[in-house]
Image (spheres, grey):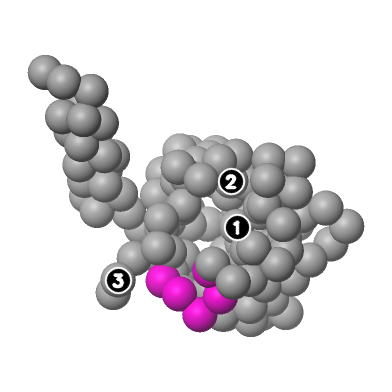
Amino acid sequence: MNAFSLVLELLLCFSNIFAATSIRTARAKKHIGESTVVCGKVVEIVYFETISYLSLDRPYLQKIFLVGMSESVGFTFAAVSRSYFDKRVCVSGRVENHSGTPEIIVTGDGHIQIRSK
């Protein structure tokens, strides 16, 4: 198996994981402490000091799920806004409780995917 075939196989396997096991943002609260994939539409992006928060499915003030993207791992506010605003995304990671709102902190590009639907 050559390197290209291996990379292609890994990418297909990774995308199947996103498709098969994802949950909606409204159900994320029931999965605090678990590693899972959450999908929704980015409706607002807010920035606090060195972290951008993507608010999925509802505006930030009515938030039901957040995605944290830190500048320390390469996610600048400008890049996040250009790439993700008004798009459907799936994010993988451990669901944490952020002041009563479930969130996943993204630690790299491989943990968030833009979805076509």
The secondary structure type at the circle numbered 2 is strand
Splitting the image into 4 quarters, where does residue 22 fall? bottom left
Q: Are marks 2 and 1 in contact (CB under 8 Å)?
A: yes
Ranked by sequence position, the earlier of labels 2 and 1 is 1
Q: Nearer the viewer, mark 3 or mark 2?
A: 3
Q: Nearer the viewer, mark 3 or mark 1?
A: 3
- Which amino acid, mark 3? Ser
Query: Pointer 2: residues within 10 angstroms few (<14), some, or many (20+)?
Result: some
Nearer to the camera, 57 or 49 = 49
Ranked by sequence position, the earlier of labels 3 and 2 is 2
Query: Number of marks in the image?
Result: 3
Q: Which residues are magenta?
A: 84-88
Which mark is drawn over residue 67? 1
Q: Are marks 3 and 2 in contact (CB under 8 Å)?
A: no
Nearer to the camera, 3 or 41 = 3
Query: Pointer 1: residues within 10 angstroms few (<14), some, or many (20+)?
Result: many
The secondary structure type at the circle numbered 1 is strand
- The residue at the point 68 percent across, 46 percent down is 74
Splitting the image into 4 quarters, where does residue 3 fall? top left
Q: Residue furthest right?
A: 49
- The residue at the point 24 percent across, 53 percent down is 19
Residue, disc 3:
116
Q: CA distance from mark 3 to mark 1?
A: 19 Å
Residue, disc 2:
106
